[in-house]
Image (cartoon, rainbow, N blue to C red):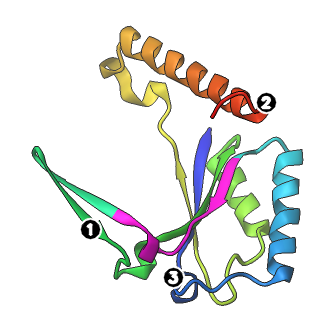
Amino acid sequence: MRVMVMVKATGQSEAGEMPSTELMAAMGQFNEELVKAGILLAGEGLHPSAKGKRVLFSGTQRTVSDGPFAETKELVAGFWLWQVKSMDEAVEWVKRCPNPMNDDSEIEIRPLFEAADFGEVFTPELQAQEERLRAEIDKSAADRQKGSAP
């Protein structure tokens, strides 16, 4: 199963406070363990919400709001995508994670939808489209690594 592991923002992360060298080193070591275990698919830190935007959808209307966004506890400061055997395995890995902030912090784990979760609405045609798009994404990523794509 794939899960998104979200590091929740704090007042410090929203203020743009950068982690210490020691924390960066500890997180680097943790990420190495994830890679060696074959779990890590992707992971990144995010700039504070002051640098972000939100788009509100209402029918055909789109309204853009500039950050910062008020509810820090609802914001994400970083994320990983993991491939794990179970939610329990994901929890065990998160428990091994260094505290991602200089103060108290929280990490949320949520499973990603899989094709089977959608049932009959995910028709064979839609499944084929999804497979084609994933193959294109993989090819683009490989091309970028080789330096042949812009």
Circle on res. 14: 3
Q: Magenta includes 50?
A: yes
Which of the two discs, 1 and 2, labels the residue nearer the N terminus? 1
- Mark 2 Cα within 10 Å, few/some/many (few <14, many 20+)? few
Q: In the depicted view, which residue is nearer to us: 146 or 108?
A: 146
Q: CA distance from mark 1 to mark 2?
A: 37 Å
Q: CA distance from mark 3 to mark 1?
A: 17 Å
Question: Which residue in the protein does label 2 denote?
Answer: 146
Question: Residue 146 location, x and y as percent?
Answer: 79, 30
Q: In the depicted view, which residue is nearer to us: 58 or 127?
A: 58
At 27% from the left and 57% from the top, the residue drawn is 55
State which mark lies toward you, 1 or 2.
2
State which mark lies toward you, 2 or 3.
2
For the N terminus, give its image quadrant. top right
Q: Quarter of the image holding residue 145?
A: top right
Q: Quarter of the image holding residue 2?
A: top right
The amino acid type found where label 2 is placed reads Lys
Q: Which residues are magenta?
A: 42-53
Q: Contact, CB < 8 Å: mark 1 with mark 2?
A: no
Q: Going by the image, does 64 lie left or right of 112? A: left
In the image, residue 97 sits, relative to residue 109, either above or below, namely below
Q: CA distance from mark 2 to mark 3?
A: 35 Å
Circle on res. 104: none
* Element class at badge 1: strand
Q: In the depicted view, which residue is nearer to us: 103 or 96?
A: 103
